[in-house]
Image (cartoon, rainbow, N blue to C red):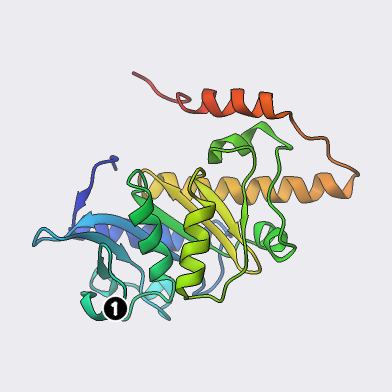
Amino acid sequence: MSDVVLIDSIEIRRALIVTARQMNALRINVNKSGNVSVRITSECGREGFLITPTGIPYEALEPADLVFIPMFARDLSSAVGLRKASSEWALHARIYEKKASVRAIVHTHSVYATAMACQEMAIPAFHYMVATAGGQEIPCAPYCTFGTDELADSAAIALAEHKACLLAHHGVVATGKDLDDALRMAVEVENLAQCYCIARSLGEVPLLSNEEMALNIEKFKTYGVQK
């Protein structure tokens, strides 16, 4: 999937469902928690995003269950779909509004990252791969009640210069240029959180310098580019 805005289609809807199911298969999420979205343009030309519905097991999802939310929506009165959107739809909406580069969002409750979030801890620069999220650390957004505009704003601020963040006492938000990219970022955040928790159990964890992290951030801007 490319970084261009996609037109709503059965293929895109199926890909979103596959991503949602992979969250649980990869053990970065459990049961019906978390949610997934992808930025699209509807068949009638409206910009917005598709998101998983609330309260339906991912294994039971069908393409028609996904909900379309127009850009800049402030309530669900303009939502299009057979189901009610995820309770965190506003979080996704605010991120898409603030960051045009984001094409997909994966929100999980992965164990180690959520444990750190419950301690209101960021993931610091203990490993060079932290730079894949775009900054000196993977920040932890302040706690706000789930499903609120306050949480949406808090996450959007934390993600202003980053591709992922933790949500205090809640979980993880990972963004990407497409669904696969966002899922990879969510997996990487959980892996880094697990590594950091283990490293802390062995003693004080030395951190990389700001200068070294800045170098890594620059290197990751072209990492994997074949052209």
- Residue most extreme to the top: 227
Task: Return the residue found at the far left.
Answer: 44
Judge left or right: residue 203 versus residue 150. Answer: right
Count every numbered label the image shows and give the total: 1
Expressed as whole percent of the image width and height from the top left, the position of residue 98 reads: 37, 52
Location of residue 190 in the rendering, given as x and y in whole percent from the top left corner: 62, 52
Percent x, y of residue 167: 59, 62
Asked whether 39 or 136 is in front, the reply is 136
Q: Within the image, what quadrant is residue 89 found in? A: bottom left
Asked whether residue 81 is in view, the answer is: no
Q: Residues within 10 Å of mark 1 (few under 14, many from 20)?
A: some
Q: Quadrant of residue 91?
A: bottom left
Q: Quadrant of the C terminus?
A: top left
Image x and y of residue 60, in percent: 37, 75
Q: Which residue is mark 1?
A: 76
Q: Is residue 164 visible?
A: yes
The kind of residue on which mark 1 rests is Leu
Could you tell whether 89 is left or right of 215 in the image?
A: left
- Element class at badge 1: helix
Is 128 displayed left or right of 82 in the figure? right
x 23%, y 72%: residue? 64
